[in-house]
Image (cartoon, grey):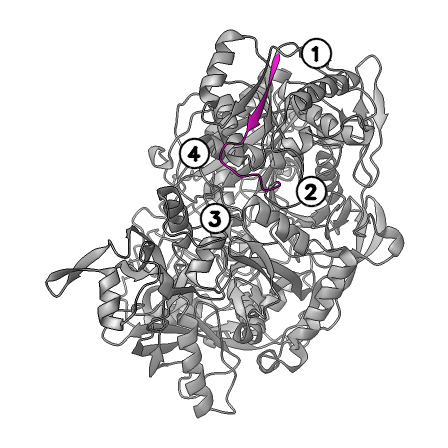
Amino acid sequence: MSDQGGKKGKGRGRKRGKGRGGQQQRQNESVPGRQQQQRDEQQGATALPEQRQQPQQGRQQSQKQPQRKRQPSDEQQGATALPEQRQPPKETQQQPQQGGQRSQKQPQRKQQPSDEQQGATALPEQRQLPKETQQQPQQGRQQSKKQPQRKQHPSDEQEEAMAQRQPPKETQQQPQQGQQQSQKQPQRKQQPGDRTDGAGPSKPQGQPSPASQGDPRPQDPSQPRAQPSTQPQPSTGATKPAPPQQPQSPRGAEKPDPSGQRGGTPQSDRAVPKPPRRPDGGGRSGRPIQLRANFLPVKIPTGDVHHYDTDIREKGKKSEEGYTRAEAPKIIQEVVKIYEKENPSGPKLVYDKSGKNMYCRRLIPGIGKDSRRYNLQYTTDNGREKEFIVDVKHAAVVSLYYLNEALEGRHTEIPFDIMQAIQTALQQMPKMKTIQVRNSFFDYPTGREKDLGGGIQVWNGTFVSIRPTQWKMMLNVDTCATGFYKGQSVLDFMCEFLNQRNLPRRLDERQRKKFAKEIKAIKVETTHIKRKQKASGLSFKSAKDETFDCEGRKVSVLNYFKDKYNITLQHPDLPCIKIGQKGNLIPIELCRVVDGQKKQGKLTGAQTQQMIRHTAIPAPDRLQKITELIRKLHYESDPYSRDFGISIGNEMVTIQGRVLDPPLLMYGPGNRPGKEMPRDGSWKITKKMLDPKELKEWALISYINDSQPKRGGGGGRYRGPEYLDDRGVDDLIHYLVDVGREKGVRVNENPCYVGKETGFHGTDKLFSNLKARYPNLQLIVVVLPVNGDDYYEEVKHCGDVVYGITTQCIKVEQASSDFSDWRKRETLVNLWLKINAKLGGTTCALDKTVKSPILQRPVIIFGADVTHPAAGDKSNPSIAAVVASKDSYPTLYNAEVRVQTHRQEMIADLKEMVKILLKKFRASTGAIPGKIIFYRDGVSEGQFRDVLMNELSAIQRACRELKDDYTPAITFIVVQKRHHARFFAVDPKDQRGKSRNIPAGTVVDTQICHPFEFNWYLCSHAGIQGTSKPALYHVLYDDSNFKSDDLQILTNQLCYTYVRCARSVSIPAPAYYAHHVAFRARHHLKIESSTEGST
């Protein structure tokens, strides 16, 4: 899968169920019960998730649901009926909910005309089964008591799996929807993994369901399966109706034999609403543009793929012991070598990075559908030769039929297992020759790698990922670059990391702590015995002072290595490296950093600048580089893809896109409004602001860095002053006041306080004095020195958290510019955009004549994001931020922040945050929004189901708690930037800027997008440096049944409302603001955040 996929299990890639057949566990899976968050807390408070209580699933369903009469005000308010009031679709009305008792007889309700009009969608816990599953019993429920209970035999799991995997019968034999279900069903004996609350067996985290077959519990083979009807059904707001007639299967795509099918059949989790289908054939707004996309067409075969599980253990130890996660695929490779030697003409075997999953086109000779044990000798990274036992067991038959059916639109989910098998086959050859990092493959160093400083290099690689698209599979190929640790002695690495030209004789405590944090979890090789192990830290004492017990006496590390290895240490005053879990002490001079290790945690500012300079290449150059990578992959001669029958095209696809019109923007005061039309994603602010505020009392502080030597800006390019002197301060005040007045801000030209401060440790006291002396202080302008990250953190902590004073920072590099040159005043203009917004003003707004129709009625726009601590940090919390508009433009936003469990992506306290923001919207506008548009950033594809289960439900519950009958129409959109889709304009006339990128507003919603779900790519900004990266939008829920043009135009316009600059940005402003709020909160808590060192 692509690297938007969910997190895998620890070191094993895929979690296994009972009996080691991964497919069997997925058949018994159900979504865990949602937790209800009940909290009464003050605004802005933080709460830990473990303090919140959640409601249980499994409410009793009424056999007769009262029909709600449609009121004339419903459509006007844009409200949607409460889930309790919504009638289920007729194809699912006979399906009781989870945890309840199965009714012997349920009355069949006639479909009312109001159901289709309302388009209501039920909460996830109240959603009825899809039509394919209406006759299947639900998990955890008591069956008919007339049937005797059958004892479970060892072979039953396989028999049930085969029955569960049966494909649907031909549509001519399908019963009509709403037929009565057979009441006599065999009772299933409870399994050890089943939950007792009626919700079924617990589901592994991050494990997506492979498909959409319905009830994940095995069905009795004697009972008939419900078949999908060919009749169109009314829309429920979450999915589009199926076409009246299903298309014919492609020639050769034969339906697999149900009796032998054990894997690959689509299933669905009944408690989770599915994302809506694409409402139309794509948008029509905008002018057409021809593009090339970095996707290659893939032709997949028909038939089956065999899936095998592997289990590795050291002889004499328990399962999964005696080897590291990185060694697992190497051990499996040794098994493959044994197999290939025994079967030179047998089918090719491929395996994933975890070494847990193995696939082949035909049954493995000598194993078939059984298992085999291999015994082999393997030398581990620590230099020890061990004997391993590897069990290879047939797990499932994965049918390619269901993938073809999904691509043709006859199934509503993409089978995960089939995608994983194809992905593994296509990545097998690159994996054997390179270093794999997720779906990227990096060549081993050649000595020409770009040095980023601090012991880090840039490695160039190739990204390869299979993607389902409209009517066919595509292979996404892109260039990538990531920071790797340089292979060198640890002494050299320490000097580079600590920025020391000469090797220090000893480390002070600050240096020791800093380097100990960096060396932790880096794999090092000891030079005296050639072993590779991970470092766990540094010793507190030097090699000559650290002692340990050896044969009943105290021995120093210095003397031990002299006596045992005849090694005289050259640097005995330096600390030792702790190796492994036991913390064995090795002198630092006897260790080397192992090649091929990706940089953990975020890059420094200087490293990030170097990375951008290295990777930011113009669009035509990137296109040429991708073309070269495609030739380098040699898929035409790849024995693995050829054995699997997979054919890859050699040329990138040409697709049709559209360029949306930019919105007209309003500037100037209300009595003299002006308008600006953006061009290529940018515009000049030549007029006054729409709503400028008055700045009466403000201060200016210039900091002097007392802890860093003068090194010219850290990056070697800035050669100006290290801090702002008196003359520079006077010039900054003069031009700042001048530019502010030009834009309509009434600003006092005499700050109440101007001062210089050395070091940031006195910031708290300074802010306290200013707050006491100037109670009406509105703003403090802070000039940060070179390398002033610590100053910024302290200023924001004191200003935002401690004293509640608005601050605006500017780097000395910008503050020392010659503002007499009008071209350099753009810096001050952008500064005033931020200041006016912080004072509550409005810079500009969307013109009413072109504003999206969605914004013409009361609607609230949300943005949400979660930031996590840096890689390797196992204790600090994650930060969740949610912002929401508070005006009708929308330009102004309120924000809520919460601290939650370490690396928890789901927003735990979303219900309370949404309630607070809805109340603030009502207080500022006097209206209740009839629609909610929710942009969620930072969610991967593997987390879509969890988002629908948790966050969508939280929003709905927040609305009901505000008012019982308050049910606004909700549209939930995920915004993704971590993907590798790139577009290149074919016509040179469509190329923009020095980098010749695609125009701002380019949208793609056909051909390379999802086969049936509602998603699109939008490049809303103009690329300044490097190749533009579009954002990927995926609609997970939509009560309003918006068309493609509706949401695409709204999203594009919101990208022009970002207050910090006169340019359109790459994602909607509320999502951008949520990102900023979350990172600002991390500064408040003084926690290092995670920033991937990859582009």
Q: Quadrant of residue 16?
A: bottom left
Q: In terms of secondary structure, where does tag 2 sit?
A: loop
Residue that extends furthest to the left in the rendered view of this protein: 552
Answer few, some or many: residues within 10 Å of disc 2's Cα (few below 14, many 20 plus, some between 14 and 19): many
- Disc 4 vs disc 1: Cβ atoms closer than 8 Å? no
The label number, if any, that marks residue 749 in the structure image: 1
Residue type indicated by callout 4:
Val
Q: Is residue 700 magenta?
A: yes
Distance CA(mark 4)–CA(mark 1): 40 Å
Left or right of 688? Residue 944 is: left
The quadrant in which the C terminus is found is bottom right
- Disc 3 vs disc 2: Cβ atoms closer than 8 Å? no
Q: Nearer the viewer, mark 4 or mark 1?
A: 1
Identify which residue is drawn at 37% across, 34% down: 48
User: Where residue 360 sits: x, y (%)?
Assistant: 50, 79
Query: Residue tagged by mark 4?
Result: 899
The label number, if any, that marks residue 1066 in the structure image: 2
Q: Nearer the viewer, mark 1 or mark 3?
A: 1
Distance CA(mark 2)–CA(mark 4): 27 Å
707 vs 386: above or below: above
- The numbered mark, 4 or 1, whose residue comes first in the sequence reads 1
User: Where residue 534 sits: x, y (%)?
Assistant: 37, 61
The magenta span reads 698-712
- The numbered mark, 4 or 3, whose residue comes first in the sequence reads 3
The label number, if any, that marks residue 74 in the structure image: none
